[in-house]
Image (tube, rainbow, N blue to C red):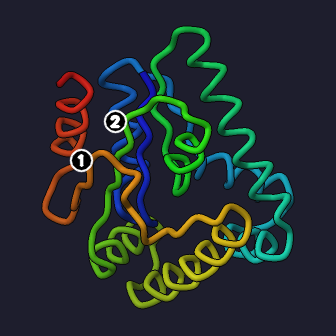
Amino acid sequence: MIVVIGGPPGGGKTTAAERFAAAHGYVLVSAGLLFREMARDAGMDLAAFGRKAESDASIDRELDGRVLERVLREDSLGHDVVVDGRIQAQLLSERRVPCLKVWIDAPLEVRAKRIAGREGKAVDVAMREIADRGRSERSRYRSIYGIDLDDTQVFDLLIDSSDKAPDEIVALVASRVDG
């Protein structure tokens, strides 16, 4: 089984994916962690690497190729996989890879508070960074793949995480996997 968890920064997708993988014995493939590794390998912080990706589509294509390859490899080995990433549900759907697609979101203010707390920065700084990242990703994913980040029709389950603890989200996902 492949479970894809998408959502905007601070929505809770990575936390949910990590906890779901640990609780249910799934292999975790994280597009966000891979992107951070690529940035680190390039000697850049996340924001600078994101800006570079705006003018170099090969960065996103390489990232998405790595994610797809890892997901398909683990699946072919008979492992259950949970993958987190902003556009992985759309990319796997285009390839007709069967999976449960989950979108986790929360209002901007909630997401900014989470990121600010996690990264030790002011909420207004986190809000600006989320907005900048959102503009960049919307432009890149539309240009490269024709994906509209605001279109959630591909998802099987939409979760508002603003009033839910991570374990509640994991339970909601598990109920769809088991159901």
Q: CA distance from mark 2 to mark 1?
A: 8 Å
**Which amino acid does the dot numbered 2 rest on?**
Arg
The disc label shown at residue 166, or none: 1
Q: Indicate the quadrant containing the N terminus: top left, top right, bottom left or bottom right.
A: top left
Of residues 152 and 86, the one nearer the viewer is: 152
Circle 1: element type: helix
Count residues near mark 2 (Cα–Cα under 10 Å), then give few for <14, some for 14-19, many for 20+. some
**Which amino acid does the dot numbered 1 rest on?**
Pro
Task: Name which quarter of the figure residue 147 lies in.
Answer: bottom right
Say if mark 2 contacts mark 1, CB within 8 Å.
Answer: yes
Of residues 25 and 97, the one nearer the viewer is: 97
In this rendering, the answer to whether 28 lies above or below 36 is: above
Residue visible at 43% across and 52% down in the picture: 6
Residue visible at 68% across and 67% down in the picture: 46
Task: Name which quarter of the figure residue 104 lies in.
Answer: bottom left
Task: Name which quarter of the figure residue 47 lies in.
Answer: bottom right
Q: Is residue 151 left or right of residue 46?
A: left
The disc label shown at residue 81, or none: none
Count residues near mark 1 (Cα–Cα under 10 Å), then give few for <14, some for 14-19, many for 20+. some
N-term mark: 2 or 1:
2
Q: Which residue is mark 2?
A: 19
Q: Indicate the quadrant containing the C terminus: top left, top right, bottom left or bottom right.
A: top left
In this rendering, the answer to whether 124 lies above or below 107 is: below
In this rendering, the answer to whether 35 lies above or below 143 is: above
Report the label total: 2
